[in-house]
Image (cartoon, helix red, strand yellow):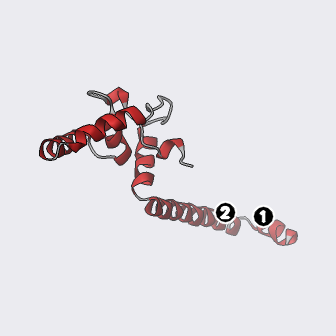
Amino acid sequence: MNSPRTTLYRDKQNAKFMGVLSGIADYTGVNALWVRIGFLILALSMGWPILAYFVAGLLLNKKPSHLYVDQDETKYWQRVRQNPKRTAREIRSRMKDIDRRLADVETFYVSSNPRLTAEIERLR
């Protein structure tokens, strides 16, 4: 089952008609103008995207207004949808960096405080 943040919705807040194309733009992180231009080119050359647009407009749920807290969260979930493995790697890398920095602080503090060092050794 998909998380609400990784589901395709109609984006009625930024919509021009039914919100399908702005929902696709929100889902992919691509500018809505480029999605609309691409749709227009496909619709004029093939015709069937117009039918697909109306079907999607009927089937897709409206995007909840409380889905994202801020713009940073929106960008984060767009990156997750685009490439979940890359996003997981980035998070792991950030956590390793935080862990390394915390270990450096701990080493500095413990090495400059012999009483604390003795207390830690006594607990082992």
Residue 95 position, x and y percent, is 56, 61
Residue bearing mark 2? 109
Q: Is residue 49 left or right of residue 94?
A: left
Residue depicted at x 57% and y 49%: 1
Where 39 sits versus 80, above or below?
above
Give the quadrant of the C terminus: bottom right
Q: Is residue 84 visible?
A: yes
Q: CA distance from mark 1 to mark 2?
A: 9 Å
Residue bearing mark 1? 116
- Local packing at callout 2 (Cα closer than 10 Å; few below 14, some 14-19, many 20+) is few
Residue nearest the viewer, comparing 93 with 38: 38
Secondary structure, mark 2, is helix
Residue 41 position, x and y percent, is 14, 44
Q: Amino acid at mark 2?
A: Tyr
Q: Is residue 22 visible?
A: no
Count up the numbered dots. 2
Residue farthest toward the left in the current orientation of the protein: 45
Residue depicted at x 51% and y 59%: 91
Residue depicted at x 27% and y 27%: 17
Residue depicted at x 36% and y 27%: 13
Residue farthest toward the right in the current orientation of the protein: 122
Residue 108, quarter of the rendered image: bottom right
Q: Is residue 115 left or right of residue 62?
A: right
Residue nearest the viewer, comparing 83 with 38: 38
Secondary structure, mark 1, is helix
Task: State if disc 2 and disc 1 touch (CB < 8 Å).
Answer: yes
Residue 69 position, x and y percent, is 49, 35
Q: Amino acid at mark 1?
A: Leu
Where 49 sits versus 14, above or below?
below
Residue 77 position, x and y percent, is 45, 47
Labelled disc at residue 15: none
